[in-house]
Amino acid sequence: MRSFLYAIAVGLVGAALLHIVIILSLPSFTGRDAYTRVQAFGETNRFFPLAGEPGATLAPINDDPALKTAVCAFSLENGPIRLSAEGNVPFWSLAIYDSASNEVFSMNDRTSVSGALDTLVATPIQLIGIRKAVPPELEQSILVEMRGDEGYAVLRTFVPSQSRLEAAVGFLADASCEPFTADQ
Amino acid sequence: MFRTPLVIATALAVAFGLGILSSIYALRATVGFGAIALGPWTAFPAAQTVGADPYAKAHRARDGRLLLGGAEGLTFTAATDSENRTLMENCRYEIKGITPPARLWTLHAADRDGNPLEGARAGLPTGLNSWSALRSADSNFSIRIASSAMPGNWLAVPDGRAPFLLVMTLLDTPTAGSSGVIDLAMPGIARLGCADA
């Protein structure tokens, strides 16, 4: 009898350890975290508007009827990424996440320079080079220092009514997420 | 002679059984620590950050949602009414009051997994926002939630008996960074009645 009580006590300690191991290691092997789902679109450096209904792929869906969302998975290996968008929408917001889906940077239209989105995402080393001699086209841009090489950007815009849908869809369709190369 | 293997099997069964079940339970029960609870509404302002606790990180990795960044807004979710009864599709509810300071807000109903719900038919109002909601003279609003048409602001939910969630997103709000200095209040959710309950 005593040995069974002992076994249960050992089991409880083991359960506590296993619980901690599962919780801590889960983020690295769920296979359906936000970054993996964003990558399901297949192509990087391009904004993809989200569908309203879950499709056959893992791709994330638009989960608020009053917000339209587009996502762009990017890699900074071949240089910084410039995000830009412009349009007549009442509200837009941008969030940049690293590959572990941690927020790196977020902003909305009120915190932008002129109401339009113009942001450059770069690694700390690339940023040093850019800051040394800021190219004229980046003078108004917001420079964001990225953790790691890979991540994704989420661009949302507010659609208060059906009549604003066209402008919102156009805003997201025209949004660009492209590697930046300075004009010589 | 089978005593020793049996003891070891007990220890292993307890360890794996409880370890796995407690992890699943913890991830289902909550999004993590650091919630802001205002009446029935809860929000997790730090769930998307690098400083989120391990439970929040495990939960968001399993959930795979695109969370709102700090400057974008804050999502409040309610699973119960103000008297702590689960929100059911066959009941009618009224949300009354005012939101914390925010530039815009949106409201919609979702199933227990967080996917937005459709109305009983296409074209019904399944989402309301600060531009479309009608307000009284003191800028309070009253939103009725039911599967059949209601006067005033109406949010349609499907015709069924399933539990659902209400999701209110405040866009561009200082609420996320609030240290409790501002007195925040979310609108209350009152149950008006239930069909054949």
Image (cartoon, rainbow, N blue to C red):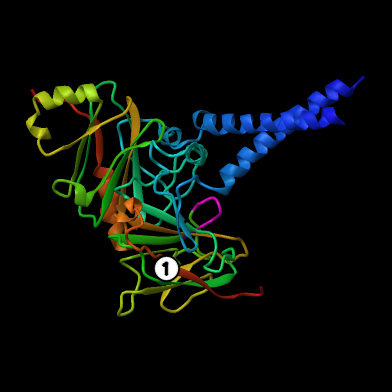
Find residue A121 and report its image quarter.
top left
Q: Which of A31 and B13 is in front in this view?
A: B13
Find residue B173 and report its image quarter.
bottom left
* Screen quadrant of the N terminus of chain A: top right
Above or below for B113 versus B158: above
Q: Where is residue A18 in the image (x, y as percent from the top left)?
A: 63, 30
* Screen quadrant of the C terminus of chain A: top left
Residue B15 visible in image = yes
Q: Where is residue B159 in the image (x, y as percent from the top left)?
A: 58, 67
Report the residue at 66% width, 34% height from top. B19
Q: Nearer the viewer, residue A54 or B15?
A: B15
Looking at this rendering, what residue extends furthest in the right direction? B1
Q: Position of residue B169 (x, y in %)?
A: 38, 57
Residue A182 visible in image = no
Above or below for A132 versus A165: above
Please, what is the dominant secondary structure of the magenta stretch? Answer: loop
Instruction: Name which residue type carries label 1.
Output: Pro
Q: Residues within 10 Å of mark 1 (few under 14, many from 20)?
A: many
Q: Where is residue B141 in the image (x, y as percent from the top left)?
A: 37, 73
- The residue range painted magenta reads B109-115
Find residue B132 and report its image quarter.
bottom left
Q: Mark 1 lies on which chain?
A: B
Q: From the viewer's perspective, is A164 left or right of B31?
A: left
Q: From the viewer's perspective, is A118 left or right of B190?
A: left
Q: From the viewer's perspective, is A156 left or right of A80?
A: right
Report the residue at 84% width, 30% height from top. A2
SS state under label 1? loop
Q: Does the magenta stretch include residue A47?
A: no
How many marks the image carries: the answer is 1
Residue to which mark 1 is pinned: B187
Q: Which of B50 and A11 is in front in this view?
A: A11
